[in-house]
Image (spheres, rainbow, N blue to C red):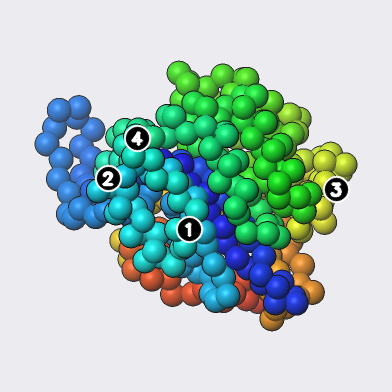
Amino acid sequence: LIGVVAITLTNSMTEAVSIVCAGLSCLDLQLLGCTQSGAEESIEHYDEAQWTAGGSASMTATTLALITKSPTQIFVLTKLGKDYNGNTMLDFYTRSGAKTDLVLVDPKVQTSMAVLPVFKAGGRGCFVNLACNEGFTTEELLGRLDSAPSNCKAFLFGYPHLLPSMQGGELKEMLCSAKSKLGPDCLFGVDLNGVSVDNHRESLLQPALENVDVLHLNEEEASILCGGEDVSKLHKDGCAVVVLSLGSRGAKVSISSDSDRLSRCPGHIKSWTPGSTVHVPAFKINGDINANGAGDALFSGFCLAAVWSSSSSPDATVSLKQAAEFSSLVARQRCDAITRETPAEAAEELMQRVFQGKLPEPL
């Protein structure tokens, strides 16, 4: 189940602008508060079962929809089956505030579904039937993108390792075509998930990296792609910014040393120091932990900060450190069971926290 999401922001002239997010989605059955004994055939327990719209497009969409305000609009473009799970996904999008005008419903396919044990100690597992994700094509995505809102400030794409028709040369072609449709002022981000030693190959991602302004991955994925936390290889292949999730240790963001590459990036990125890095902590939360979608929230929050423009502070610039701090605050609200679906602070308030240095206590 693939999704494209358009998030409308406002610039200093209160003109509506958009962020488009594309990527894998599925209907998630979350098993909250799971025990984890470690024994393969042990009987584990959970506290509660909850349904939610999951995957890159859904998590990015709902995270940003819940923290952005009117006249912000979010348009979801996703491939769903004409089935109960597809209708449930549409309902989740609508309730989050996202518009479903661009959703592609295909009666010939089945909506994707995943079962996710969310562990008491943090982290989660995943069992998924990719269903309509496996047949979603570049042509279908680009066709729907023709109807995307104008003045797009970012295009975010998630989980190429789980999308067989959007890898390698096809991934590069899709990003290039999307760039031609959305224009040179549009930031392009790619979020990784589902990367394994078995399914990763150099040719799956490398050809597209020169078209990626922001790449997000976690520690395990960095180990597979780069042999560890040193992600300089990804910069050498053309990626401008790499956001590395470190779980409870926060996140590390690194910038390409190639000033020419940075100059081609939109938003605030072109003003950041070539070759610089920053580490931000994860912040303490008040409720139970639900880490499902934490990486999507960090990624989408960072990209939102990288193209930040607000009518209340039209001349404000966002530094690399501030973008990283903002993304960690967005992830904090998403991981807290209390604020997950009803965030305590909107994006504008979170950014003011960052500008004023009023950050929560770190873990």
**Residue 132 picture location, percent across and down:** 39, 35
Q: Mark 1 belongs to which amino acid?
A: Asp
The answer to whether residue 157 shows anywhere in this view is no
Q: Mark 2 belongs to which amino acid?
A: Asp
Among numbered discs 4 and 1, the one appearing first in the sequence:
1
Q: Based on the displayed image, in which of its 4 quarters is residue 134 positioned?
A: top left
The residue tagged 1 is 101
**Residue 183 picture location, percent across and down:** 76, 50
**Residue 35 picture location, percent across and down:** 20, 44
Q: Mark 3 belongs to which amino acid?
A: Ser
Query: Which label was assigned to residue 83?
Result: 2
Disc nearest the viewer among 4 and 3:
4
Question: Is mark 3 in CB contact (under 8 Å) with mark 2?
Answer: no
Query: Which residue reaches farthest left?
Result: 43
Q: Based on the displayed image, in which of its 4 quarters is residue 235 positioned?
A: top right
The residue tagged 4 is 109
Query: Which residue reaches farthest right?
Result: 260
User: In whole angstroms, how far apart are the C-alphas of marks 4 and 2?
Assistant: 9 Å
Q: Is residue 11 above or below residue 213?
A: below
The residue tagged 3 is 263
145 with respect to 11 (left or right): left
User: In whole angstroms, how far apart are the C-alphas of marks 4 and 3?
Assistant: 42 Å
Q: Based on the displayed image, in which of its 4 quarters is residue 18 positioned?
A: bottom right
51 with respect to 147 (left or right): left
Q: Is residue 291 above or below residue 191?
A: below
> How many marks can you see?
4
Disc nearest the viewer among 3 and 2:
2
Among numbered discs 4 and 2, the one appearing first in the sequence:
2
Q: Describe the element under mark 3 as helix, strand or loop.
A: helix
